[in-house]
Image (cartoon, grey):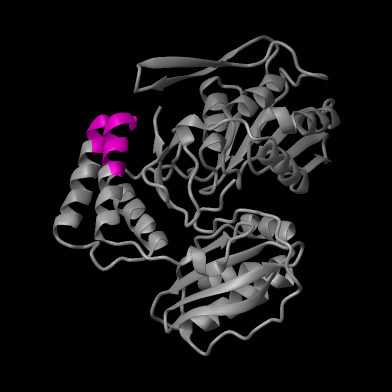
Amino acid sequence: MLIPTLVILFASLATPQPQAVNTPDTPAGHTLKAWLDAFNSGDRATEEKYLKTYDPERSLDDEMRFRGMTGGFILTQILKNEPQRIEFMVKERNGDTVAIGKMEVKPGEPAKVASFGLRAVPPGTKAADLSFKIDAATRAKVIDGTVAALNDTYVFPETAKKMAGAVRAHQQKGDYDAISDGDDFAKRLTDDFQAISHDKHLSVMFSPAALPDFDNQKPDPNREAEERKQMERVNCGFKKAEILEGNIGYLKFDFFAGPGICGPTVVAAMNFLANVDAIIFDLRENGGGDPKMIAFISSYLFAERTHLNDLWTRKGDVTDQYWTDPYVPGKRLDGKPAFVLTSKNTFSGGEEFTNNLKVLKRATIVGETTGGGAHPVRGHRITEHFGIGVPFA
């Protein structure tokens, strides 16, 4: 999973232990130091205080999970220093991953985060190779490509036209002319598209390294091995399985990983809770994932094979049906009361799981309105360095 504005790609780099450097005496520098101090502490209360003060939109659970994966960061270099923007380099404490970060803050005291991202430096790549600027021709090509992808595949064609019109209007007024940073341009386009669609799944992406051809990707054993390793490090997103007073089962998991890798984790959790009198699924920090895993977990709640939902793809006018599995390892909890806890951070597949059980009257939903990102996404490469994730169904 990706943290919305904090993207990290893990790679193995052989680098010596670096010497830490100090943050500059600027608003951006002060906020960066506050983040590093809180993140590196590993203390949940300290991190929560930082987020409330500087970055209230970021998820505390996501931050703590990310902290567990990386062990924290060592600040090794300041690459660019402006009063309200700082670019820097860090090294993860738990491994050899080196990353470039960008943080921009808003005016005020304290200086709250406007945008923040980390990007790993791929093996054999120098930091300087990741710091190139984009020009007018690139901006025009990216706009043309993103608009074409939306008009061709976005699930709501009329909304696609409105998004295209809004971005073209910004382009004609010169609103993008001063943007030379790839990440900044991708974020601005994302914001402008989402301002019309209100679709948090839709996003423009930028990568200094060449993006893959999403439409023609072949299986990569190395990538699959790395994915398995990452899933093992975070226990496939499963945070807690316990039996509460009154023989009530409680299961918290923060994303739906692919069953090919994480199916055994689900089986272990559900078998542990096999004899409870009711079950609570805590999806308050669940950011979504694989529909096949949604169907697999749901299968434990139904005695018979049950139709969960249909997925209509606009391009090609194709409808795919999703059903529970006819067989699951272990006992089912069919007939046992089920509850789903939600919050504003429940997103995408978390919303699908919740809505399926609500429509089928199989669970009681308790909590806040969810994040709003129910449509599946497919990536499209626009240029070697820009792509767009388009909700297509």
**Number of numbered discs overlaid on the protein picture:** 0
Expressed as whole percent of the image width and height from the top left, the position of residue 318 reads 40, 15
Q: Which SS type dominates the magenta stretch? A: helix
- Which residue shows up at 47% across the image and 57% down it? 208
Magenta residue check for 159: yes
**359 vs 132: above or below:** above
**129 vs 295: above or below:** below
Expressed as whole percent of the image width and height from the top left, the position of residue 351 reads 52, 35
**5 vs 17: above or below:** above
Location of the N terminus by quadrant is top right
Q: Is residue 214 found left or right of 290 in the rendered image?
A: left
- Which residue shows up at 67% across the image and 69% down it? 91
Q: Which residues are magenta?
A: 145-160
Farthest bottom residue in view: 25
Q: Is 246 in front, or is 307?
A: 307
Q: Is residue 126 found left or right of 224 in the rendered image?
A: left
